[in-house]
Image (cartoon, helix red, strand yellow):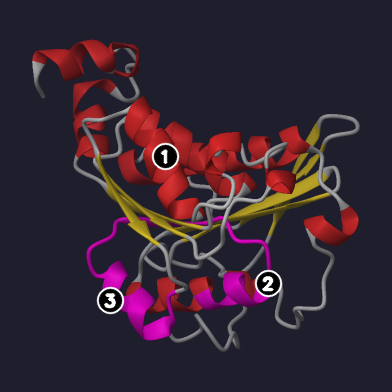
């Protein structure tokens, strides 16, 4: 770590639980953020600020003015621009010392598996169940840790999936019959800070996974309610008949 990096990350290094070695691990890490909307905006900013050495941002959508109340990595100047490119532009200004790759197309299963071969962690910041199921499946197959979150109206949920940890359930275990006919932000609305809170939590859980900082959140479904600021943690179990992870 160079002198300027020691100064930049000094508040991290002061933490006994993280220290110099933990920060060096972050600098050596490669993280993929799939979806740079509300969740991905918050998550990517904190990952970049924390010094993740290589960020891959994946999004085939473009910035719309209706996104700006919650997708805070984007600006009025980037309306109409691809979200991955817009986010890369802003994050480069936040931390020019890290590598940021923008993927502007939607990746299929084979393409995702190719990317995962060189990735330490995935954050699923998409807004539909079909994408979450796909990313859960490929991450379990590749044994790449995954932090998945969702937010709608004034509520959010978060789950960590890590096939490297024994008895850690996957997303399919918890939602075996989930259909894609669900509410979306464009249909039901979303309070801006709610999606930001969940995205920041994804970044936090990601840093914990990369550095072994704190206890693992595998086996928990974390639920947030903005109206009373309550955070609840539910124990979830691996399904021995799960079509995705039972044999992993």
Check disc 3: other Cα within 10 Å, few if <14, some if 14-19, many if 20+: few
Q: Could you say whether the residue bearing mark 2 is in a helix, strand or loop?
A: helix
Q: Would you say 194 lies left or right of 23 here?
A: right
Asked if the stretch drawn in magenta spans residue 180, the answer is no
Q: Earlier in the sequence, mark 3 or mark 1?
A: 3
Q: Please identify, in this view, whether the residue under mark 3 or under mark 1 is nearer the observer.
A: 3
Q: Please identify, in this view, whether the residue under mark 1 or under mark 2 is nearer the observer.
A: 2
Q: Could you say whether the residue bearing mark 1 is in a helix, strand or loop?
A: helix
Question: Is there CB contact under 8 Å for labels 1 and 2?
Answer: no
Q: Could you say whether the residue bearing mark 3 is in a helix, strand or loop?
A: helix
Which residue lies most toward the left here?
2
Between marks 2 and 3, how big is the CA–CA gap?
22 Å
Of the 4 image quadrants, the one containing the C terminus is bottom left
Q: Identify the residue position indicated by label 1 in the image.
A: 208
The answer to whether 166 is drawn above or below residue 68 in the figure is below
Of the 4 image quadrants, the one containing the N terminus is top left
Tell me what residue is drawn at x 79 percent, y 55 percent: 185
Asked if the stretch drawn in magenta spans residue 125, the answer is yes
Q: Would you say 239 lies left or right of 246 here?
A: right
Q: Identify the residue position indicated by label 2 in the image.
A: 129
Q: Earlier in the sequence, mark 2 or mark 3?
A: 3
Tell me what residue is drawn at x 73 percent, y 33 percent: 193
The answer to whether 104 is drawn above or below residue 196 in the figure is below
The magenta span reads: 107-134
Q: Identify the residue position indicated by label 3 in the image.
A: 114
Given residues 161 and 50, the one toward you in this image is: 50
């Amino acid at each position: 770590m160079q002198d300027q990096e020691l100064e930049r990350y000094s508040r991290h290094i002061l933490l006994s639980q993280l220290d110099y070695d933990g920060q060096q691990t972050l600098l050596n890490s490669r993280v993929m953020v799939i979806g740079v909307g509300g969740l991905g905006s918050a998550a990517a900013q904190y990952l970049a600020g924390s010094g993740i050495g290589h960020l891959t941002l994946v999004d085939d959508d473009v910035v719309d003015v209706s996104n700006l109340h919650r997708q805070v990595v984007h600006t009025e100047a980037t309306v109409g621009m691809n979200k991955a490119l817009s986010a890369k532009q802003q994050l480069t200004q936040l931390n020019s010392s890290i590598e940021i790759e923008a993927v502007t197309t939607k990746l299929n299963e084979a393409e995702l598996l190719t990317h995962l071969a060189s990735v330490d962690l995935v954050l699923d910041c998409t807004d539909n169940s079909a994408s979450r199921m796909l990313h859960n499946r490929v991450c379990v197959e590749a044994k790449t840790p995954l932090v998945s979150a969702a937010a709608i109206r004034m509520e959010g949920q978060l789950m960590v999936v890590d096939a490297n940890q024994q008895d850690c359930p996957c997303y399919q275990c918890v939602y075996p019959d989930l259909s894609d006919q669900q509410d979306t932000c464009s249909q039901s609305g979303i309070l801006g800070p709610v999606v930001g809170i969940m995205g920041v939590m994804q970044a936090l859980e990601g840093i914990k996974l990369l550095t072994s900082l704190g206890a693992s959140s595998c086996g928990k479904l974390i639920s947030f309610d903005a109206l009373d600021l309550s955070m609840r943690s539910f124990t979830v179990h691996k399904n021995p008949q799960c079509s995705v992870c039972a044999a992993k």
